[in-house]
Amino acid sequence: MITLRGLTKRFGPTTAVDDLTVDIAPGRVTGFLGPNGAGKSTTMRMILGLDRPTAGRALVDGRPYRELRHPLHTVGALLDAGAIHPARPGRAHLLATARSNGIGRRRVDEVLALVGLDDRAAAKPGRTLSLGMGQRLGIAGALLGDPPVLLFDEPVNGLDPDGVRWIRQLTRSLAAQGRTVLVSSHLMSEMQQTADHLVVIGRGRLIADAPTAEVIAGGSAAASVRVRGPQPAGLTALAQRLAGDGGVVEVDGPHGLTVTGLTADRVGDLAYELGVALHELTPVAASLEQAFMALTDGSVEYAAAPADSPTTHHRIEAR
Ligand SMILES: Nc1ncnc2c1ncn2[C@@H]1O[C@H](COP(=O)(O)OP(=O)(O)OP(=O)(O)O)[C@@H](O)[C@H]1O
């Protein structure tokens, strides 16, 4: 269990983490989400005793990191996967960590097997490891003390699809064993598949702390229907009719509409009534990505200008 109480960190004028109170429970994967600069890494660093809170507390199994009697046996972390000794082989690195923490060499072999690094890979100097191999080595280090709490900061960054799937299965199995698993990621589709629960922050503040399904279903991230047709005038008439029927219609250029609040069946029926030809009528499930954008809107440090120009993308209201 990770317990954050009023956790706050200021760097000069910047409040990186702002009065964060949340419990990260065992037995599930908790996704830690937030736009760039939201304070995720700083929060993780405070949990691991690498940054000192300006106010509040970050506890691992009830204690601040610095007071843990056997830190490596309590919490394991992958923070910066690139931080590997360039010359030292992976196995030597793990053996050194194990030795200084009273862990036997058998456990080193166990974790190497667990992360799928064979003897040849484990004998290579750090600088010659691929990104994926380095990631596996970092995770082997986190697992060395068989800790009940695990923190992975952006573990799938730069990994190929096999590596991504491997991390997903690993994090899920660690949670299924009853461990507390906190994973930060920018990849929403990945988090949607991996995390049971989400903690979302923006500008250091808590925005959401809820089961993944609830976060997706909530907010303004409703399911929608994508419509395409060859006749701009027909689509305009359809858009007015849909808005009159209670739909919210976004016009995506002359040939496209995105409709929320109505089913694809209803949109199809109304198009048929008006004699408007359609080339596409696709129900689009609400995604975590949409929910995330809606939730964090306004807490992005540097928002990009919208890609759609206002002349081709606008909303039709009921008249
Ligand atoms: N050592 C530091 N000194 C000054 N400011 C810092 C320091 N570390 C982080 N910050 C600032 O604190 C804020 C939070 O940064 P942090 O790296 O925790 O965010 P993040 O959510 O992990 O971002 P990202 O997704 O980009 O990794 C940012 O505004 C960042 O510039």
Image: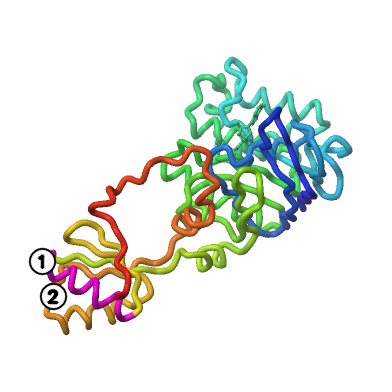
User: Which residue range is magenta in the image?
Assistant: 230-245
Element under disc 1: loop
Could you tell me the amino acid type at mark 2? Val
Q: Is residue 77 magenta?
A: no
* Mark 2 crowdedness (10 Å alpha carbons): few <14, some 14-19, many ≥20: some
Quadrant of the rendered image containing residue 211: bottom right
Q: Is residue 240 magenta?
A: yes
Q: In the rendering, which numbered label is found on residue 108?
A: none
| Relative to 241, 52 lies left or right | right
Residue 141 image point, x, y percent:
67, 34
Q: Is residue 51 above or below residue 288?
A: above
Q: Farthest top residue? A: 87
User: Residue sitting at 72 percent across and 49 percent down?
Assistant: 20
Element under disc 2: loop
Residue 185 image point, x, y percent:
54, 45
- Depth check: 106 or 100 in front? 100
User: Residue sitting at 55 percent across and 34 percent down?
Assistant: 135
User: Residue sitting at 48 percent across and 58 percent down?
Assistant: 288
Q: Number of callouts in the render?
A: 2
The answer as to whether callout 2 falls within 8 Å of ligand 1 is no
Q: In the rendering, which numbered label is found on residue 276?
A: 2
| Relative to 93, 120 lies left or right | left
User: Residue sitting at 35 percent across and 78 percent down?
Assistant: 246
- Per the picture, the main secondary structure of the magenta-coloured stretch is helix
Residue 160 image point, x, y percent:
42, 40
Is there CB contact under 8 Å for labels 1 and 2? yes
Q: Quadrant of ligand 1?
A: top right
The answer as to whether callout 1 falls within 8 Å of ligand 1 is no
- Depth check: 95 or 141 in front? 141
Q: First in sequence, mark 1 or 2: give its number.
A: 1
Quadrant of the rendered image containing residue 235: bottom left
Residue that carries the numbered disc 1 in the rendered image: 231
